Image (cartoon, grey):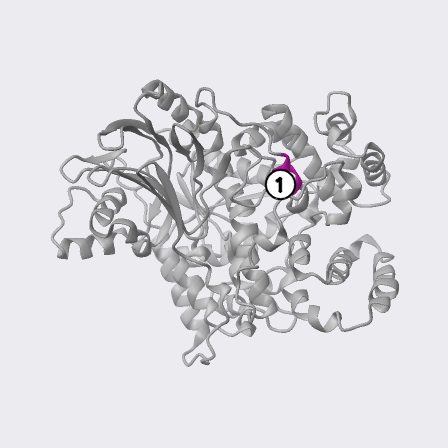
Amino acid sequence: MCGIAGWIAEAQSPLREGTLASMLQAIAHRGPDDQGMCSFRCAGAGHRVFLGHRRLAIIDPEGARQPMCDPAAGLALTFNGEIYNFRELRDELCRLGYRFTRDSDTEVLLRAYQHWEGEVVHHLRGMFAFAIWDARNERLFLARDRFGEKPLFIYEDRNGLYFASEIKALLRIPDIRTGVSPEAVWDYLAYRYVPGPKTLFRGIRKLMPGTSAVWERGRLKESRYWTAPDCRPCSSERPRNDVVMDFLSRLDEAVKLEMVSDVPFGAFLSGGLDSSTIVALMSRHNSMVKTFSVGFGESPYSELSYAAEVARHFGAAHHELVVTHHDIIEQLPKLVAFRDAPVSEPSDIPIYMLAREAARSVKMVLTGEGSDEILGGYPKHIFERFAPGYQLLPGIVRHRLVAPLTQALPYGFRRAKTAVTNLNIEDWRERYVRWFGALSRRERDTLSVLRLNGTPVSNIPPFDADPRNSTLRRILYFDQTSWLPDNLLERGDRMTMAASIEARVPFLDHELAAFVSSLPDNFRVRGLRSKWILREAGKQLIPTHILKRPKVGFRVPVNQWFRGEMRDFLIDHLQSATSLTRAYYDPHVLDRALADHLNGRQNHEKLLWTLLNLEIWHRQYA
């Protein structure tokens, strides 16, 4: 796991090693173990190429320095990530006549590109973002992994192309022409994150997941090499074998592959089904797994007791951390800076603090992230299947009878309120965005004085999916191609790398995802049961009472903290004269929403968290 940066620019560009060193220093937390740089002249096109690397040594710590160069082959590589099948690829390449000098996935990636060139991405099983300078063809090749576990940002101007693992590195380029993108602000209010390829910085974009890009003869061409399999309807063939055992075997293989490491490692453990399954499988291959859990002093929000029970069951060396509102106030501005974006989920902060605690004894962790998006684990995945039937009811019944009755229910019926509110949205494209508490177009028009189109919902997955798809597959495809890479995986990468440790996510093994996607829908959601196949597989691994307890989710008690300990912090950012974002909003609408929350009349925690973080980001970058 590492950080990369570099560019290809016209030879007369004033940028040299000092600029690259500054870019690498900005992302030093991603790779505290080593730093490397190299440069090349591009005689035909009249450009110069600079590649830089910061290293967090996980595999082959003593060797595999980067950028890795082979002058004889005319190749140079800077690489962030892990190739889990590198030993299988090395064996295949050895049979093809290639020779290797170290036990390193970096060298395997270099040779794999030498053999397959741009087709190399189809052979890789792992998480990655990399750049390869191919001197013989005067070609710069960039690629990002399938689900977007590893980041890669791009900036272009008239002189050249620049790339980096984090935006803060690109901001070190002298005279970079960027600023706040109002269209991206509008998108942020719609989604609570900025959907790719945009960022909040004008001119800086993300290379999209499952995409490669080639710079050649002064032009950059991007190509999508992989699409999440839920884009298409599942096969009509019924599964023949023991599907649950087949699934468990494939997940076990992914866990075993991702445990490959030459340094100490562990697991994040919440006590829920996903992370407990990962720990259970890890314990099959390692007799002493280290586990790390975070909780809160407010007992309804804490799962520490469940995590400790799972750890004891599998004989793990367990570590716990308790987070308070003081930690939120103290860490939030710092983490906005690490993310180069608003912290869209309050859980970012405890994840960072947990990563920092884990870094005391390990350099890599496995997590249960991605399970919900692959296996159908959210309540919306259950509710969405009822949407077509529910919307057959007359509108007057849904809007004037069911909705008011549901909204009159007490706060404990939060999920029922959310379900009815969203199922009443007839445009499924708008509904998918709304499930996680984003603002509708009407709500944005009411709150914000901005009048921008932003990213049309018709341009966001799953709107490129096969129209014959089921409602479940359609919303899962949205999760896998928007919510997951642009929010959850971005969070996981920044918060763990901020603490200089690597996080791996076995549920996002693309071969496992393809297998799950090949199954009929009821293997994921069956009636009112989510993640059916994982629950069935878990019966062989996890104590029954852990399997049967309801999902709590990793919720931070921001709702009550905003009304208490964080009240002044919130008011200062949203209502004071120093607020930079207040001009975006109708002050009467904003102040009413704030007052309704602080007085307990309504729960606007997601809205207020969204606006608070946008303000913190502006204070740092605008």
Stretch in magenta = 182-187
Please provide percent x and percent y for residue 133: 27, 37
The quadrant of the picture occupied by the N terminus is: top left
Main SS, magenta residues: helix
Please provide percent x and percent y for residue 550: 65, 61
Whether residue 286 appears in this view of the structure is no
Q: Quadrant of residue 556?
A: top right
Say which of 86 and 564 sits in front. Answer: 86
Please provide percent x and percent y for residue 496: 48, 38
Q: Amino acid at mark 1?
A: Ser
Circle 1: element type:
loop
Q: Is residue 130 above or below residue 36?
A: below
In the orientation shown, which residue stands out farthest toward the left?
Answer: 97
Residue that badge 1 annotates: 344
Say which of 349 and 573 sits in front. Answer: 573
Whether residue 157 is in magenta: the answer is: no
- In this rendering, position of residue 511 left or right of residue 431: left
**Residue at 51% in and 60% down:** 374
Say which of 534 and 358 sits in front. Answer: 534
Please provide percent x and percent y for residue 436: 66, 51
Say which of 12 and 485 sits in front. Answer: 12
